[in-house]
Image (cartoon, rainbow, N blue to C red):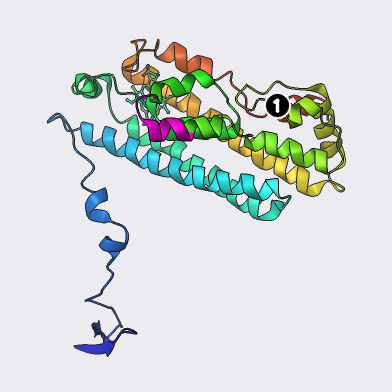
């Protein structure tokens, strides 16, 4: 049996015995813009596995979108020395990264033959051109000015990447906090050309050593350090799984983006966002 109820704006809303609203002004699909979202999967071939390939990339981009939202939010809180809300956001980024890492398990159900059946359709498109991924790398501190060249043709993406490239990274902001808390951070790590890659410093390493050796006194900074390590650890796991998945699916072919393929992805494993947070572990 259904009955009706008055909504706050006086519209008649159908309810059943359990109070379910059947006829709503704002539906699930409208709120989530589902028709548009589910209209974005448009395979170029008739091959069954192309749908998986598209969905996994789109889902990853959505998760990266949320990572950016959370990591920018965390950077803002750290900048103001308000670490507790930042911890929550950084924890969320780490959980999202776990989703991104697990996604490879779905993708590896695609064999080399499955992929080759539609690979030509991709032309020169490649994850290398993911502007969100590049923004996340810049925000975390992997500054490489050359990487924005791939986006020159698209001014909105180019300008955004240019802005984040030239702004302090999450780690730069963290070091500024250490300075405010009285640690001896070199001046040229506190103010510099932010678009240049960060170079590790023994004085920064000494600051972290003090924090790790006296966690009682510096509990919040110690916790911040471990949250950052979580992010970098997960990022590397993602990079490694990507590289192994690519090796498994295309072997040592060149990438559609024009790089050497696996050889390019292996090199990325040497990158570090927070170098002293790794080197300090030998010294504690
Ligand atoms: C069959 C699956 C995949 C293959 C064969 C593949 C292959 C490659 C290759 C060869 C590169 C190096 C650039 C190039 O020459 O194209 C690359 C880069 C990249 N791929 Fe994939 N990929 C796959 C799936 C994915 C997925 C699901 C994502 C998720 C978003 C992704 C994101 C990226 C990103 C962000 C880069 C740039 C990495 C960097 O510059 O460090 N890839 N991919």
Instruction: Report x, y in % for residue 49.
Output: 21, 32
Residue 274 versus residue 74 in the image, above or below: above
Q: Which residues are magenta?
A: 152-160
Instruction: Report x, y in % for residue 7.
Output: 31, 84
The residue where tag 1 is placed is 192
Instruction: Report x, y in % for residue 259.
Output: 39, 12
Q: Is residue 96 left or right of residue 229?
A: left
Residue 216 versus residue 193 in the image, above or below: below
Q: Main secondary structure of the magenta part?
A: helix
- Taking the magenta stretch, the answer to whether it contains residue 31 is no
Residue 65 versus residue 19 in the image, above or below: above
Image quadrant in which the C terminus is located: top right
Residue closest to the eye, 179 or 266: 179
Instruction: Report x, y in % for residue 62.
Output: 39, 44
Residue 202 versus residue 264 in the image, above or below: below
Q: Is residue 62 left or right of residue 273?
A: left
Q: Among all residues in the image, which is located at the extreme left? A: 46
- Taking the magenta stretch, the answer to whether it contains residue 154 is yes
Image quadrant in which the N terminus is located: bottom left
């Amino acid at each position: 049996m259904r009955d009706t109820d008055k909504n706050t704006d006086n519209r008649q809303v159908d309810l059943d015995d359990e109070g379910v609203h059947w006829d709503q002004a704002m539906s699930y699909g409208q709120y989530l813009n589902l028709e548009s979202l589910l209209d974005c999967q448009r395979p170029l071939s008739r091959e069954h596995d192309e749908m998986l390939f598209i969905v996994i990339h789109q889902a990853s981009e959505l998760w990266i979108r949320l990572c950016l939202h959370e990591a920018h939010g965390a950077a803002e809180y750290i900048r103001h020395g308000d670490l507790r809300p930042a911890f929550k956001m950084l924890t969320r980024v780490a959980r999202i990264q776990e989703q991104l890492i697990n996604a490879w398990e779905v993708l590896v159900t695609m064999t080399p033959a499955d992929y080759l059946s539609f690979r030509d359709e991709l032309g020169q498109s490649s994850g290398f051109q993911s502007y969100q991924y590049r923004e996340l790398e810049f925000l975390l501190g992997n500054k490489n000015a050359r990487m924005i060249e791939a986006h020159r043709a698209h001014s909105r993406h180019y300008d955004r990447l240019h802005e984040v490239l030239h702004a302090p990274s999450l780690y730069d902001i963290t070091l500024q906090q250490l300075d405010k808390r009285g640690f001896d951070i070199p001046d040229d790590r506190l103010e510099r050309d932010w678009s240049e890659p960060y170079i590790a410093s023994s004085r920064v390493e000494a600051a972290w050593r003090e924090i790790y050796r006296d966690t009682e006194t510096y509990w919040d900074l110690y916790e911040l350090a471990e949250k950052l390590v979580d992010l970098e650890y997960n990022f590397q796991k993602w990079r490694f799984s990507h590289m192994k998945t690519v090796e498994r699916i295309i072997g040592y072919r060149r990438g559609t983006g024009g790089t050497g393929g696996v050889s390019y992805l292996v090199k990325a494993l040497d990158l570090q966002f927070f170098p002293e947070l790794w080197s300090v572990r030998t010294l504690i």
